Image: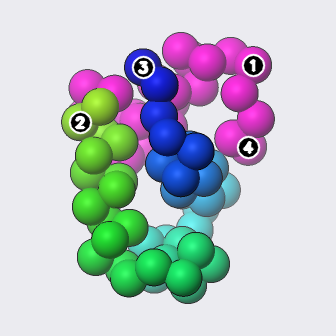
Amino acid sequence: MRLSPKKIKILTLLAQGFTDKEISQKLQMSTRTIQTHISSIVLSLNARNRVNAVALYMHQNPKCKIL
């Protein structure tokens, strides 16, 4: 599954432990927009939750640099 660069950036920040609010401030987006992107990422990866989404993405893309 390929994610857009914006969604990969959000997933990277999520993997680094940032909250939705902190991610929204860093990317200058609303918190609701970040939550919508995270929901989309979870659905796209058929993940159970946001933590599982990070794990699945890293497993499917072993050369990724999200951490």
Upstream in the sequence, badge 3 or badge 1? 3
Looking at the image, residue 17 lies above or below residue 8: below
Place residue 46 in its image quadrant: top left
Q: Which residue is mark 4?
A: 67
Q: Secondary structure at mark 4?
A: loop
Work out how far the residue at label 2 is from the one at label 3, CA to CA, in angstroms.
Answer: 11 Å
* Dot 1 amino acid type: Lys
Which region is colored magenta? 45-67
Q: Which residue is mark 3?
A: 1
Tell me which residue sits at (59%, 26%) in the image. 58
Query: Residue 67, position in %: x, y?
Result: 73, 43
Query: Residue 41, position in %: x, y?
Result: 35, 42
* Dot 3 amino acid type: Met
Work out how far the residue at label 4 is from the one at label 2, CA to CA, in angstroms.
Answer: 21 Å
Q: Which residue is mark 1?
A: 63
In contact (CB < 8 Å): disc 1 and disc 2: no
Upstream in the sequence, badge 1 or badge 2? 2
Query: Residue 33, position in %: x, y?
Result: 32, 71
